[in-house]
Image (spheres, rainbow, N blue to C red):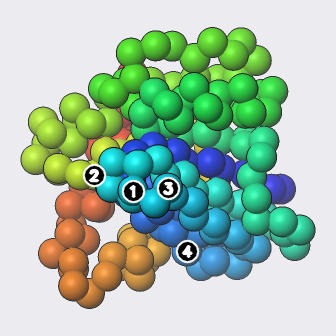
Amino acid sequence: MTTQILIAGFGGQGILFSGKFLAYEGLLEDKEVSWLPSYGPEMRGGTASCSVIISDTKIGSPIVNDPDVLVAMNLPSLDKYENTTVSGGKIFVDSSLVARKVEKSDVEAYYIPATSLASENNLPGLANMIMLGYMIKKTGVIPYESFERALSKVVPARKIEMLGANKKALELGYNYAE
């Protein structure tokens, strides 16, 4: 089984960190993985995306042109990538920042007010992890039960105090009920 994931949003929303977390958990599950970040020269405030492939077999190319799963953290990302999502794919939208609904009719769309939830739960800057928690629940791409080991590897030592907040954000997303 191969899952191609595209996470996209503004620079500074933790897009690349989200992808790194997923890829690392895939590695810990003995999967073949690919993590390919992409961002504009502006970084914070500019566009950013991250392609992640998690597979049981060798990966030929790290580029995700037609994602099985799209996580759109802002409207420009949804506008740009919605129609590239494969038929039968899943699109996750931060409904706090994106007012419109997914127009593509052959995908499953999920709307999570991640930015609002992060603010309400004193988790500033962790809407990305709330989105990932919910995406993990709905896709099963990685096992939720073991996310802590990957999280402890990707949260840098200089930000170790953020480990608990990231864990809480993932749990909040996983347990979110529409």
Q: Which numbered disc flags the more N-terminal residue, 4 or 3?
A: 4
Is there any visible trace of residue 149 in the rendered image?
A: yes
- Kind of residue indicated by mark 2: Leu
- Kind of residue indicated by mark 1: Glu
Q: Which mark is residue 24?
A: 4
53 shown above or below 112: below
**Tag 1–tag 2 contact (CB < 8 Å):** no
Q: Which mark is residue 42?
A: 1
Q: Residue at x 49, y 55 (%)?
A: 40
**Tag 2–tag 3 contact (CB < 8 Å):** no
Instruction: Mark 1: give few (<14), some (14-19) or many (20+) Cα within 10 Å.
Output: few
Q: Residue at x 21, y 42 (%)?
A: 118
164 shown above or below 86: below
Name the element at disc 1. Answer: loop
Locate residue 153, reporting x and y percent. 41, 82
Q: Which residue is mark 2?
A: 126
Instruction: Mark 2: give few (<14), some (14-19) or many (20+) Cα within 10 Å.
Output: many
**Tag 1–tag 3 contact (CB < 8 Å):** yes
